[in-house]
Amino acid sequence: MRTLSVNRLRQKHPKAGLVPVTVAVGCVLAMVGCAGGTSASTSGEMTSLRVALGYEPMSMDLCDASSARNGMFMTENIGEPLVDVNFKTTELEPKLATSWKQVDPNTWQFELRQGVTFHNGAPLNAKAVADWVNRILDPKLGCWLYGSVLDDNVKEAVAVDDDTVNITTASPDMILPQRLAFVMIGLADGDQGKKTQKPIGTGPYKFVSYQPGAEVKVERFEKYWGKAPQFRQVTYPIRVESSVRSAMSAAGEVDIATMIANQDAKAKGAVNFTVGETIYFRIDVNLPPFNDIRVRRALSLAIDRATFVKNVYGGLGEPANAIVVPTTVGYPDDVTYPYDPAQAKALLDEARRDGVNVGAPFKVVGWAGMRGSNGSEVPDTIVAMLKEVGFNATTQLLETESMRNRLGSANDPKFGPAVVLNAHGNSLGDALVSLRGKLGCKAPQSPVCDDQLDALLKQAAETAGDHRADLLAQAFRYEHDKLVALVPVAHMADTMIITNDRVSYTPNLASSERLDISEVSAK
Amino acid sequence: MARFILQRLRQGILSLLGLVLLVFVLARLTGSPAHLYLPEDASPQMVAAFNAENGFDKPLYIQLVHFLAGVFRLDFGESLLYGDPAVTVVLQRFPATLQLASVTMLIAVTLAIVVGAASAARRGSYGDAATRLGSMAALSVPDFWIALMGVAVFAVYWNLLPTSGMGGWQFWVLPLLTLALRPFGILTQVVRASMLDALDSDYVRVAKSKGVGPGAVIYKHALRNAAIPILTVAGILAAQVVNGALVVETVFGWPGIGNLMVTAIKGRDFAVIQAVVLITGAAIIVLNFLIDIAYSWLNPQIGLGE
């Protein structure tokens, strides 16, 4: 339970003597304590930090840390990965593993850091790491990490000795260390087959409490192996309303407010930053009229991406030429998706003359929960642009579960031909995951199964370095020239409010999924 | 009395059973929640494993039989979101809503009686007009707007109250004001109308002719007879306040069952949805039962169904 922060009120209104008096009287009257909630000690040093979250966590298990709902407080704070990714340089850096190497095409070996302990006092060793990774791979547990970061290509983890872990894959995976940068290592106390209620990691902060619907609290882990963090305690109030998170920041109740909606993006202290997430639409390529590539190309040419970003996202974000952001390995620099309504109309006329029913009605399916979208604004805007060139499109807005089902039903005539709008995030920094997940033959969401594309992706998966990047860029070009099944629209932006007079933090590409408290400093 | 209680108990159990069945079927019509708990690129094998683990792969009638068997043991299953038994999750959050709803109704009823009765006693005065206008405004203004305006004015602009959360008395002010406004508006109008009828009645005229003072006429004679409709509407409003705290709890981060319900519905947490509905339904049935008893207490001519 938190009481009004008297120190915060003093900071905001130094002469407002009545306010603390009112608060104190209120506390006495209500017989409640006034302790807690202050962010500064008597010496003025900031000892605690408050970060407003926009989501209820999906669990208290570190195996769900790759979900933004958990990642914002868990990743790098409670749990740490074997390998770390520097989002400024995109280079990999040692974390719980001091070194790693590929010992054979299907096996990566990791040497663990010594002297690291979990929050419950247990030492970090190879067995603990292997058990944790194998636990994630259990499909019954339903870990978010399994499917979003690790897939069924990862076979098992084995402790070679006390400090060495081998992780084997069914086929070569050149970016396994990069994937592991998203796997927070933890300990499951109690039933291994159930999600834990109390995350135990090795990070600089240990879990204190979770009050559902209210807040999560963590505190400094005094036996942390690395540099001791600056803040003794971090509290994460959970407020699902963006305007309330913004108000909390304005009232001085939080130091950082995350996931701020567009309408509050100009609030004092608001920082807009590009995230590794892209809006795109998927086309039912096997259903008429979209089984004609000219019609699909016309769909893409009809989209005025710059206007979309300006009108829907208030100028935050960028027009996209791929479903990954430009810093991603494999980003195709030479692929563009221009806006050319005249060309779109010409292509439709040509197809119409060849007997294609280009005026057939279809749905533009949108997701009600899309970041920064107000209701049906995103699909409505796309529909308006498509109508401009002569398409007969209407909006269909779905909630999350229906949207997921719809995404898994590409080319299903039951739903009719459709253009399905979705957002795709790739903070891994490598395009293979995106291309395989959205266009691979085995991908549940893929609207195509193209042997040539699959061969390119397989080759890329087994290749490293510049050649890998070339192969992935080639795959993007192939999709653009031959398939036109996924059409990128815009790279999205996120906003957080940082109370600059108390703390400083520079958001990065992953800041909508994780907030590493060691990167926040008090002023 | 015993017959009345048994009759009400039977009706209550039947209502709850119907309610639970309805919620079970409606919730299941939305399909498996697997996609909400697994990442977007989860394989069909992962989805199948999730469904098998949580029993969503079984035919609906089997799921229903398991569910009903559990209900009689007050076991609704485990929450998908929280990993605890659903009943535990709901009971942990119920007191926060109950406290908020109780204080809200206490404030709304008390103020409505005072303001509504005073307004009726001065029928046609400026005060009466202001009361009618004010109560109409109070019941018409959307609670989410009041909530956000309250935060903007009292928390951000004046910095007098916290924006949200649960804690000392300051945290109660904005949620209470927001939640109490509509019941206050409705009840004020009901009190005024009931009091006007009562004040026009013969027994009031007799009391006045016997020299009873205006205070005693209003609060002792007229109010007691006007109390039945007030009590009826207050009971309905109390149920609405318990159920309708969704917006207020969501905006103010109040960890009650309204907040829980929104999260559970979004997360297709069937066990929690069913437990919330059953426990809230039971609370409302108990409330109605108490109101029936209060009717009899207020007017002994009203029997208890015997």
Image (spheres, grey):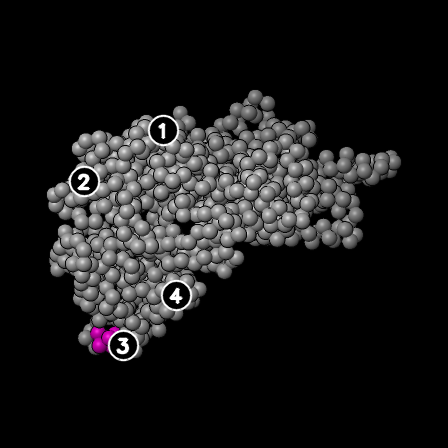
> In the picture shown, does residue B210 fall above or below B140?
above
**Magenta stretch bounds:** A346-352
Task: Give whichever of A279, A254 is nearer the camera.
Answer: A254
Nearer to us of marks 4 and 2 is 2
Residue type for callout 4? Val
- Name the N-terminal-most of marks 1 and 4: 1
Mark 2 element type: strand
In the displayed structure, does residue A471 sit left or right of residue A213?
left
Query: Quadrant location of the N terminus of chain B?
Result: top right
Q: Position of residue B198 (x, y in %)?
A: 74, 41
Q: Position of residue A516 (x, y in %)?
A: 39, 46
In the displayed structure, does residue A160 sit left or right of residue B60?
left
Task: Give whichever of A39, A375 is nearer the camera.
Answer: A39
Name the chain letter of the residue that bears numbered label 4: A
- Which quadrant would residue B27 be assigned to in this image? top left
The residues bearing labels 3 and 1 have C-alpha atoms spaced at a distance of 64 Å
Mark 4 element type: helix
Task: Give whichever of A466, B87 is nearer the camera.
Answer: A466
The residues bearing labels 4 and 3 have C-alpha atoms spaced at a distance of 22 Å
The residues bearing labels 2 and 1 have C-alpha atoms spaced at a distance of 26 Å
Nearer to us of marks 3 and 2 is 2
- Name the N-terminal-most of marks 3 and 2: 2
Residue type for callout 2? Gln
Mark sitting on residue A109: 2
Name the chain letter of the residue that bears numbered label 3: A
Same chain for the residues at labels 2 and 1, yes or no?
yes
The answer to whether one can see residue B13 in this image is: yes
Instruction: Identify the residue position indicated by label 4 in the image.
Output: A309
Mark 1 element type: loop
- Name the N-terminal-most of marks 2 and 1: 2
Nearer to us of marks 1 and 4 is 1
Are there few (<14), some (14-19), or many (20+) residues within 10 Å of tag 1?
few
